């Protein structure tokens, strides 16, 4: 994760939805965890449909 002049590599967790009919990914949600206090962002979330 990169913001301003800072870079960090946080842990991520999330959810993945898969269509059982054809095994294709339908939706992906991820959230960064344990972002350092000194990092300029406090939340990072991504959703892909």
Image (spheres, helix red, strand yellow):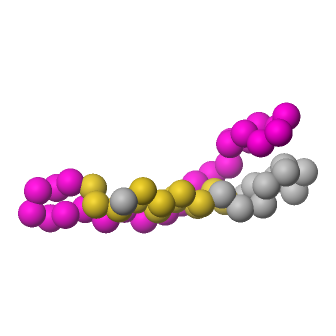
Left or right, 18 with reference to 14: left
**Rendered residue at 42%/56% (across/down):** 48
- The location of residue 9, given as percent across then percent down, is 68, 42
Left or right of residue 19, residue 25 in this image = right
Residue 42: image quadrant is: bottom right
- Left or right of 2? Residue 38 is right
**The C terminus: image quadrant:** bottom left
Report the residue at 19% width, 63% height from top.
19
State the residue in front, 33 or 43: 43
Q: Residue at x 9, y 63 (%)?
A: 21
| Residue toward you, 21 or 47 | 47
Residue 22 is situated, as x and y percent measured from the top left of the image, at 11, 56
Task: Write down the region rendered in magenta.
Answer: 1-24
| Residue 44 placement: quadrant | bottom right
Compared across the picture, whether 30 is left or right of 3 comes to: left
Residue that lies at the very extreme toward the left in this rendered image:
21
Q: Is residue 42 magenta?
A: no
Quadrant for the N terminus, please.
top right
Q: Quadrant of residue 2?
A: top right
In this view, which residue lies farthest toward the top?
A: 5
Furthest-right residue in this view = 38
Confirm whether the magenta stretch covers residue 10.
Answer: yes
Q: Position of residue 23 (x, y in %)?
A: 16, 55
Image position of 48 with respect to 1: above or below = below
How many dots with numbers? 0
């Amino acid at each position: 994760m990169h913001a301003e002049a800072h870079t960090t590599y946080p842990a991520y967790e999330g959810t993945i939805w898969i269509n059982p009919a054809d095994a294709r990914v339908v939706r992906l949600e991820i959230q960064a965890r344990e972002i350092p206090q000194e990092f300029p962002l406090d939340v990072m979330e991504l959703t892909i449909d």
